[in-house]
Image (cartoon, rainbow, N blue to C red):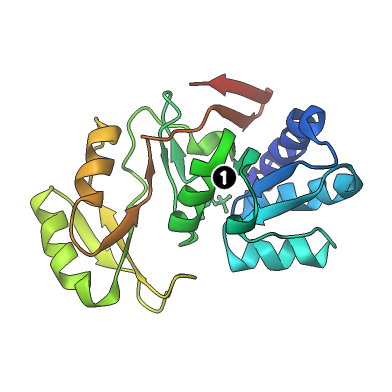
Amino acid sequence: MTQDELKKAVAQAAVEHILPLLEEDTIVGIGTGSTANLFIDELAKHKHLFDGTVASSEASAERLKGHGIPVYDLNSVPGMRVYIDGADESNHHLHLIKGGGAALTREKIVAACAEEFVCIADESKLVNVLGDFPLPVEVIPMARSYVARELVKLGGDPVYREGVVTDNGNHILDVYNLEILDAVKLESQINAIVGVVTNGLFAARSADVLLLGTQEGVKTLKA
Ligand code: 5RP
């Protein structure tokens, strides 16, 4: 199977996973990226079964609306039963690196509000040690150079993602050459730098379930 076929298989498995949760008042949290897009397309087949969604990006909101699926402001819902999203990397603790699509802050907020976080990914995303994928950090634009200098002190090589402005109007630094052995600690250290909005480590709130598309079928990993 190709990588795209593996992503489609996990998108279908994610819909199967959440079908028992879908009731007329269920709100589903929706992530961002190519795997999340495939999930949205699969979920659309069951849109009559649940109330609506909260989206983690303008792009996902547009795709959902295109399918006729209601998209609510996060402030207008009491919470979410489940959040489904992709990842750039996952370790075996289901600590993630996210933000390849620059949506990390909204993704982290929506994930925080969900009872269950289901991550969907193809097998190339599972690693022993996080950090081969450069860690995205969303920064307030005027703080970009200061934050970059602080990230160098933490051992990383930050690179400005030129031309990218997040849905929140901010910039992204991609931090190369980090060998992330303590993801919870590094997440907290980077978030403590003045000017950082958030970083793409999802470790304090990791995924609860990882549906991993492999050549042997979709595997379910739990934290
Ligand atoms: C976007 C993300 C995505 O979940 C991540 O980049 C994975 O994307 P894809 O499913 O396209 O591989 O964090 O900010």
Count how many numbered circles sit on residues in the image: 1
**Residue at image x 71%, y 35%?**
14
In this rendered view, identify the residue nearer to me: 56 or 81. 81
> Which residue in the protein does label 1 denote?
86
Kind of residue sitting beneath label 1: Gly
Q: Position of residue 79 (x, y in %)?
A: 61, 43
Q: Is residue 64 above or below residue 5?
A: below
**Residue at image x 45%, y 55%?**
104
- Indicate left or right for 140 with 37 as reference: left
Q: Position of residue 87 (x, y in %)?
A: 51, 44
**Residue at image x 64%, y 41%?**
80
Q: Position of residue 140 (x, y in %)?
A: 29, 70
Query: Is residue 70 shown to the viewer in this render?
Result: yes
- Judged from this view, the residue extending furthest toward the left is 153
Query: Is residue 136 shown to the viewer in this render?
Result: no
In this rendered view, identify the residue nearer to me: 133 or 103. 103
Q: Helix or strand or loop: what does disc 1 sit on?
A: loop
- Mark 1 vs ligand 1: CB under 8 Å? yes
- Indicate left or right for 100 with 175 as reference: right
**Residue at image x 46%, y 48%?**
108
Q: Is residue 48 above or below residue 169?
A: above
Q: Quadrant of the N terminus?
A: top right
- Indicate left or right for 178 with 40 as reference: left
- Indicate left or right for 75 with 138 as reference: right
Q: Is residue 184 above or below residue 158?
A: above
